[in-house]
């Protein structure tokens, strides 16, 4: 059933009820007004009839029948179209429309009352009549028939009922017409959205404001739902691409260490009497191959997590605490390395804590492997400071070593996937993770020479955005697992 039809049915049922309710109140008010008017007329007539009633009582008390009859005619003439009943010590005289003598009248109240008898109704008022000489007391009743008032009330009631019966179809038709016109933009919106299929059609809802709040709000909601569907579809496609890339990269990069391990196993199996030194060397090759496999899987998993992380995983992170924890773990794992840390407190960024920790850990691991000085000892300096990047505040994380450094021609390629030196024990993904997390947090990555031109300096400049703008810093589309386009971006030199 259409909305306009529902509205017409509801209005067609409610309006007559409202008319009847209003008519019931109106009939009550009209009846009250008629009673008030009748009561006022009775009181006015009672003042004029009371003197004639006293004359009747005086003549009856003096024993003058003729005078009494004359007074009665004068009394009845003063009453006109109302009923009169005068009760005194010598009997009761009555004339005009009134209840029969057998009907019991209410007790004296001084106010007009209603009397019912034989299906008829009168409005009555009681007036005490007193004669001084001779001293006589009587009671005068005046009765006004309610037939005329009831006829008027019945007429009003009939007209209310007629209006209610006419109001039902008229109000229903008018409500249907108005509702149909009001619902027309809603029908147009339904017609435009019925053909939209997010699976097969790239067209989306193009809504022109109608200045009808409900329709415009519904259209905005539909546009939001479609936009979120597109976003989630894109994220699903990225997730599938990431999964395929993870599988392809894992199968490609794990083939070499697996074949090497298979060769070592074949040697151990074929030569049971292998020389102990050769056996130890073969077992050591197996351990290195296993470690490389494990490292590759861990790095690929971390890279995939960075591509799939959602914005709600981001929260305020204290960079000083995070860098200090990473340096402490490195010192415990490699006590022979000389690692220093200088950090400015209170530098908080809106970021993904596991990703930021992976960034710092991989910078330290790269410095530990490639940053050894000529004496063979690793010397690493980690610093965290605040600076202004243009007009916006920023936090700068610096990791500096005393190794061979990074040649200028390689500062763009070292961040590519699986880029590693021939003598490197790593997986070739550590600096890729650094670049991914820098891009994910909208940080700027710099590569340069260390102090005095010795070693390498890696700097990551994090924007310190206000908390209300933090969500704008999360990149929605990442593809570090599925392509290496970002490795070709310009990497500026680190500041000395």
Image: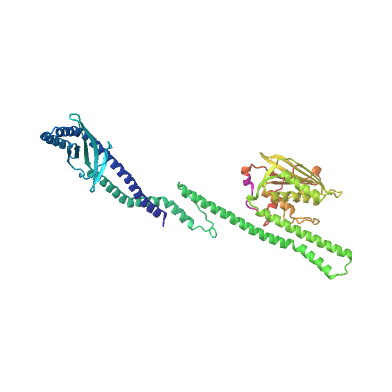
Q: Is residue 195 magenta?
A: no
Is residue 404 among the parts visible in the rendering? no
Where's the N terminus, which quadrant?
bottom left
Q: Quadrant of residue 459?
A: top right
Task: Provide residue 5's location: percent of width, then percent of height.
Answer: 39, 55
Q: Relative to residue 90, is residue 447 depicted above or below? A: below
Q: Residue furthest top?
A: 133
Query: What sort of colour scheme is used for the picture?
Result: rainbow
Task: Provide residue 99's location: percent of width, then percent of height.
Answer: 21, 44
Depth check, front residue: 169 or 71: 71
Task: Provide residue 316's location: percent of width, then percent of height.
Answer: 67, 45
Q: Is residue 14 left or right of residue 492?
A: left
Q: Is residue 446 left or right of residue 139?
A: right
Is residue 363 among the parts visible in the rendering? yes
Depth check, front residue: 137 or 443: 137
Q: Magenta part of the protein: which range?
A: 470-477
Where's the C terminus, which quadrant?
top right
Task: Provide residue 60's location: percent of width, then percent of height.
Answer: 15, 34
Residue at left 19%, top 38%?
Answer: 86
Q: Is residue 191 left or right of residue 93?
A: right
Q: Relative to residue 286, is residue 341 depicted above or below? A: above
Q: Quadrant of residue 249?
A: bottom right
Q: Is residue 144 left or right of residue 164?
A: left
Depth check, front residue: 72 or 403: 72
Depth check, front residue: 158 or 194: 158
Residue at left 84%, top 68%?
Answer: 268
């Amino acid at each position: 059933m259409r909305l306009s039809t529902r509205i017409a049915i509801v209005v067609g049922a409610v309006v007559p009820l409202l008319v009847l309710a209003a008519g019931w109140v109106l009939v009550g008010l009209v009846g009250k007004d008629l009673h008030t008017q009748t009561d006022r007329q009775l009181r006015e007539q009672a003042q004029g009839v009371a003197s004639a009633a006293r004359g009747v009582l005086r003549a009856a008390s003096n024993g003058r029948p003729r005078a009494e009859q004359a007074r009665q005619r004068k009394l009845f003439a003063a009453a006109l179209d109302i009923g009169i009943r005068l009760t005194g010590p010598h009997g009761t005289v009555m004339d005009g429309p009134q209840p029969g003598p057998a009907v019991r009248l209410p007790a004296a109240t001084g106010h007009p009352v209603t009397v019912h008898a034989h299906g008829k109704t009168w409005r009555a008022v009681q007036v005490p009549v007193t004669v001084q000489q001779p001293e006589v007391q009587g009671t005068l009743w005046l009765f006004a028939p309610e037939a005329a008032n009831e006829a008027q009330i019945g007429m009003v009631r009939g007209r209310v009922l007629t209006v209610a019966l006419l109001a039902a179809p008229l109000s229903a038709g008018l409500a249907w017409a108005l509702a149909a016109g009001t619902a027309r933009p809603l029908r147009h919106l339904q017609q435009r959205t019925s053909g939209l299929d997010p699976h097969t059609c790239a067209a989306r809802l193009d809504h022109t404001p109608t200045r009808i709040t409900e329709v415009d709000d519904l259209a905005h909601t539909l546009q939001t739902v479609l936009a979120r569907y597109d976003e989630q579809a894109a994220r699903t496609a990225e997730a599938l691409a990431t999964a395929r890339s993870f599988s392809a990269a894992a199968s490609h990069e794990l083939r070499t260490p697996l074949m090497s391990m298979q060769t070592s196993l074949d040697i151990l199996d074929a030569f049971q009497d292998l020389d102990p030194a050769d056996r130890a060397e073969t077992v050591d090759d197996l351990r290195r191959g296993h470690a490389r496999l494990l490292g590759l899987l861990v790095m690929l998993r971390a890279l995939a997590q960075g591509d799939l992380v959602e914005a709600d995983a981001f929260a305020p992170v204290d960079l000083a605490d995070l860098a200090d924890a990473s340096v402490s773990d490195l010192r415990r794992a490699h006590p022979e390395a000389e690692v220093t840390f200088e950090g400015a407190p209170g530098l908080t960024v809106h970021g993904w804590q596991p990703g930021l920790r992976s960034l710092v850990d991989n910078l330290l691991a790269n410095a530990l492997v490639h940053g050894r000085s000529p004496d063979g000892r690793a010397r690493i300096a980690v610093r965290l400071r605040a600076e202004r990047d243009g007009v916006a505040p920023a936090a700068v994380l610096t990791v500096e070593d005393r190794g061979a450094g990074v040649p200028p021609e390689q500062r763009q390629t070292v961040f590519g996937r699986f880029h590693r030196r021939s003598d490197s024990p790593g997986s070739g993904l550590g600096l890729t993770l650094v670049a991914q997390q820098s891009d994910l947090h909208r940080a700027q990555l710099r590569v340069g020479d260390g102090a005095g031109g010795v070693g390498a300096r890696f700097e990551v400049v994090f924007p310190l955005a206000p908390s209300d703008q933090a969500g704008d810093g999360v990149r929605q589309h990442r593809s570090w697992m599925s392509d290496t386009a970002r490795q070709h971006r310009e990497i500026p030199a680190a500041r000395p």
